[in-house]
Amino acid sequence: MKRFKNILIVCDEDGDAEVAVERGLWLAKANGARATLLDVIKTTKGGLGASFASLSETRAAEIEGQIISHYTDRLKSRTGAFEATGVPVDVEVVQGIGFIEVIRAVLRNSHDLIVKNAGPGASSNWLFAGDDMHILRKCPCPVWMLKDGQPRRTERILAAIDPDPLDPTRDALNRVTMELATSLAERDEAELHVINAWRLQEETTLRSGRFAMSESEIATILQGEQDEAQARLDAFLERFPDAAKKREVILRKGFAGDVIPEYARAAGIDTVVMGTVGRAGIRGLFIGNTAETILGAVHCSVMTIKPPGFETPVALED
């Protein structure tokens, strides 16, 4: 599926840029897309020039230009593989706060995918560092965040979906999630695992003793919820034939924030594809609570997708 046409590959030195470049090139070739290699000189606006304020204005400008040229030349040294395979490639060096400039590049040039290696420095509570989490939360286009140590080609992909035919926004998000996961699996000849977590919203309350409900009554309600979830999942997957016969479908009871990371670890998943918010058109609603929990617990690469109409809080200019 040729979905991407304008891929942004972030090549900062915080992560293993070679993996991001390799995967970005692979996707660009597969999709007939243009690629841009981006590096951000991490300073406040005008901060690079301010560092040389003790020098003459001419000399400060000269040194600033040399630094920018160094970053640009480093990006250009990575373009040979793109040019050799006929993939149009640009390079761009900007100054500013990392995640803001990455998202501004998306807005400025209408990129439809970011490929980036996860940088170091994640805290004990998050497996992705601060800038990476900002990009995952706030970028309007899909983001493929690659964790160090993952295979160069995906082997087991997990698509996390939550079918609801009565919710057009969620349905659209599920559809894009499945399309991207299926496309990646086909390109890499990888296993595709599809997971849907279900639960009875008030099960704990029903078991609290305040209600005179027997275990058999609760079991009947639970079975009904499971059957309904299975029916929604089956109906949704009818739109995505399993041509390669390498798909495994999992319907599991529990909170998605617990179920999905647990399954990803147990099944040796190397890439999770998931939506990150359930509502659109709300500036500043960066990411849903369930997605936050999942991103804080998975130990693999992730591709995150926003729903149609998502509005990033990042503006092109301050």
Image (tube, rainbow, N blue to C red):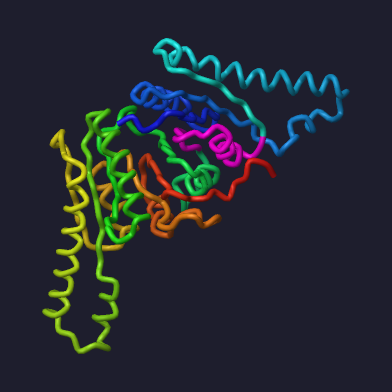
* Residue at the outermost top position: 84
Percent position of residue 293, x then y = 40, 56
The answer to whether 305 appears left or right of 137 in the picture is left
Q: Nearer the viewer, residue 241 or 103?
A: 241
Frontmost residue, 176 versus 57: 176
- Image coords of residue 244 (percent x, y): 15, 33
- Is residue 317 one of those drawn in magenta? no
- The part of the image, by quadrant, that contains residue 289 is bottom left
Query: Position of 291 compared to 266: left or right?
Result: right
Above or below for 225 versus 50: below
Residue located 36% across and 33% down the image: 3
Q: Position of residue 102 (x, y in %)?
A: 56, 36
Q: Quadrant of residue 61?
A: top right
Residue range corresponding to the magenta coloring = 96-119
Which image quadrant: the C terminus?
top right
Q: Is residue 245 above or below residue 187?
A: below
Please name whichever residue, 308 or 149, is drawn nearer the observer in this view of the structure: 308
Q: Residue at x 31, y 49 (%)?
A: 174
Q: Is 115 contained in the magenta span?
A: yes
Residue 209 visible in the shown view: yes
